[in-house]
């Protein structure tokens, strides 16, 4: 209980400071199974906080008429189009997982689209008066297309692979968990001095408290 109360005090202080100084933007990055989504959703329940999920922006971009749809089909073929007309993400993942050149092409198409959507969403939240915006996505730490100047802080959640494997196995079918873990192996912490790291082992409340303590430092 003490941990939860302490986190509440940190949250209140952070929200108050953001109200006085303008919106604070915190990026949360890490590979699949690091718990970044869980932590972001937990914190977003607090007054003044909001959560922007980059994976949701990818889904929008993959829909028919979305900004990444036509370029991806042109590069990888109609085989990646699902029955609903959207990009079939598992199929696309199969094509790039063992092909570095194909993965680079995928990122060259998708990352600029998502980066622009992030920029627009940050501007929208700022106009709406959000106090603290948590932007969550693996690409935040590594993609050169993301405008780092838009963020007050980008945090990398570090979790050993065996623990990430256990977490993914609790949520996804075995084949999906294995694919996500394999894709996550290509998401390493960049050697960027501006990127801060926290230990992601522990309960979501514990990890959230570490993130907030870092934001307060």
Image (tube, rainbow, N blue to C red):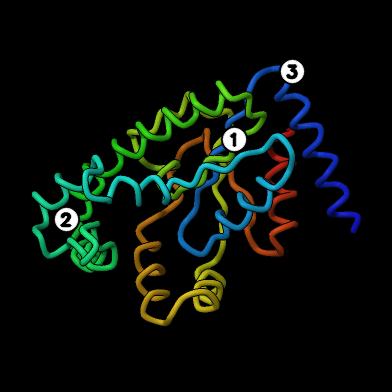
Which of the labelled discs sits on residue 102, or is there none? 2
- Foreground of the two, 40 or 215: 40
**Label 2 crowd bin: few (<14), some (14–19), many (20+), radius 10 Å:** some
Residue at image point 64% right, 56% down: 199
Return the x and y of residue 87 as percentages of the image width and height. Answer: 23, 57
**Closer to the eye: label 2 or 1:** 1
Between the C-alphas of marks 3 and 1, the distance is 15 Å
**How far is mark 2 from mark 1, CA to CA?**
33 Å
x then y, percent, for residue 197 = 59, 46
Mark 2–mark 3 contact, CB under 8 Å?
no
Q: Which quadrant would the N terminus be assigned to in this image?
A: bottom right
Q: Is residue 193 left or right of residue 190?
A: right
- Which of the 4 image quadrants contains residue 127? top right
* Position above or below: 56 against 154: below
Q: Is residue 43 left or right of residue 62?
A: right
* Label 3 element class: helix
Which quarter shows the C terminus? top right
Q: Seen in the image, is 130 located left or right of residue 144? A: right
Going from N to C along the chain, the mark reached first, 2 or 3, is: 3
Q: Residue furthest top?
A: 21
Instruction: Report helix, strand or loop for mark 2.
Output: helix
Marks 2 and 3: which is nearer the front? Answer: 3
How many C-alpha atoms fall within 10 Å of the one at disc 1: few (<14), some, or many (≥20)? many
- Of labels 3 and 1, earlier in sequence is 3
Residue farthest right in this picture: 2
Which residue matches tag 3?
A: 20
Residue assigned mark 1 = 133
Name the secondary structure under disc 1: strand
């Amino acid at each position: 209980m003490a941990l939860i109360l302490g986190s509440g005090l940190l949250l209140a202080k952070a929200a108050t400071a953001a109200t006085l100084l303008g919106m604070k933007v915190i990026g949360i990055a890490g590979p699949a199974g690091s718990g970044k989504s869980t932590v972001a959703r937990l914190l977003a329940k607090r007054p003044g906080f909001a959560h922007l999920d980059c994976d949701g922006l990818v889904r929008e971009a993959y829909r028919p008429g979305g900004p990444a749809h036509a370029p991806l089909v042109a590069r990888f073929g109609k085989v990646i189009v699902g029955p609903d007309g959207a990009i079939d993400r598992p199929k696309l993942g199969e094509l790039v997982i063992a092909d570095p050149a194909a993965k680079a092409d995928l990122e060259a198409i998708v990352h600029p689209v998502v980066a622009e959507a992030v920029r627009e969403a940050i501007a929208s939240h700022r106009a709406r008066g959000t106090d603290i915006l948590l932007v969550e996505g693996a690409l935040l730490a590594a993609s050169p297309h993301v405008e780092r100047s838009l963020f007050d802080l980008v945090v990398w959640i570090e979790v050993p692979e065996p623990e990430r494997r256990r977490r993914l196995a609790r949520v996804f079918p075995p084949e999906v968990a294995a694919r996500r873990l394999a894709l996550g192996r290509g998401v390493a912490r960049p050697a960027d001095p501006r990127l801060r790291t926290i230990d992601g082992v522990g309960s979501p409340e514990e990890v959230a408290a570490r993130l907030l303590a870092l934001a307060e430092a």
